[in-house]
Image (tube, helix red, strand yellow):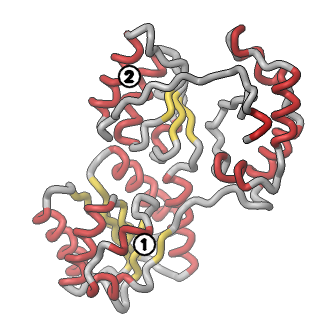
Amino acid sequence: MEPFKSCDKRLVLSVVDSGSTGTTATKAFIQSYNNMTTRPHIIVGTARSAAAMPTAVVSGIYDVPMITYWATSAKLDDMGEYPRFMRTIPTDDAVSFSVIQYWKGLGYKHAAMMFINDAYGEAYKESLVKHGAAEGIAVTAFPFNLEDDAGIHKSVDKMKESGVNIVMVVAFTKGFKKIAEYATKVGMMGKGKMWCFGDAVISSDFDGLSSAAKQAVHGSIRIVAAGALDGNAAWDGMMTKLKTTTASSFNPHYPSYFKVGKTEEAEFAAAIDVKSGHLRDIGTYVEKRVGGGVCVCV
């Protein structure tokens, strides 16, 4: 953006691979923290909830804020366990609630769920079952491990035997494909069935299915969180607050070398345009645990 080319503030980034696992991510953080040249003031990531949970515990102990863009497990809302954790996306609990409300509106009373057997999937399952019970909808859950094809087949077979026609799937690309292909093969997916997918399944995943599975998945739905919409209370509230934000809102929290001056304050105010596609892209989600902000050069 042209107004910010003269900005004298710089953020130095160190990129590490979380490996999408708690052990790898936590080890990477500790190594970075113990190196004075790479010790982070804030962590962006990790993406997976399974990696974020243990990392957030350790970063909280060291008083290092952690903000993630994709870790959606509701368990991360625990302020006592994860005191410095923040995120820019709603939790799975909100999506689970929406799924149940959708099923309730259609009059469904029984449903099944297949979920990846890790911290992310387990928390998602707990939310769906909890909200289902509150609305009188019985949700039978089946965990699966990505490399256990026999286990995936067994779970799909059990769902078919139970006679359930409503299924929620919490899986990533490979797991989704395995489930969809086998469910199509045994007639568990297709006409007369309602399949729902979480946000871990992305649009391009459907392109990787066989012709038969693509046909069978027609009519399925994907329920995800949406933000940056006019009329959304959280988005409108953030825009209102940003318009009145001044340097004094940020400077008490910044080190001396990062204080905001009058020039940066004016540039920040000029950049707050409600119609800005740039702002909508970077500020799509507003969630109650997001407490961080940068009023420097945006």
Q: Position of residue 152 (x, y in %)?
A: 18, 65
Label 2 environment density (alpha carbons within 10 Å; few <14, some 14–19, many ≥20): many
- Asked whether residue 171 is in view, the answer is yes
Locate residue 242: give its quadrant. top right
Locate residue 208: give its quadrant. bottom left
Is 241 in front, or is 31?
31
User: Could you give the CA–CA distance between mark 2 and mark 1, rounded to whole angstroms?
Assistant: 36 Å
Q: How many labels sit on residues? A: 2
The correct choice, above or below, for 252 with respect to 2 in the image is above
- The secondary structure type at the circle numbered 2 is helix
Q: Position of residue 43 (x, y in %)?
A: 50, 27
Which quadrant of the rendered structure holds the C terminus? top right
Is 42 in front, or is 57?
42
Label 1 environment density (alpha carbons within 10 Å; few <14, some 14–19, many ≥20): some
Q: At 33% across and 83% down in the image, what residue appears?
A: 214
Going by the numbered disc 2, the residue's amino acid type is: Phe
Q: Which of the two labelled residues, at mark 2 and mark 1, occupies the earlier sequence position? A: 2
Q: Which of the two discs, 2 and 1, sits closer to the camera?
A: 2
Going by the numbered disc 1, the residue's amino acid type is: Cys
The correct choice, above or below, for 104 with respect to 261 in the image is below
The tag on residue 29 is 2
Q: Which residue is mark 1?
A: 196
The correct choice, above or below, for 118 with respect to 263 in the image is below
Q: At 69% across and 31% down in the image, what residue appears?
A: 293
- The secondary structure type at the circle numbered 1 is strand
Q: At 22% across and 73% down in the image, what residue appears?
A: 156
Q: At 66% across and 30% down in the image, what residue appears?
A: 292
Say whether residue 131 is left or right of residue 32: right
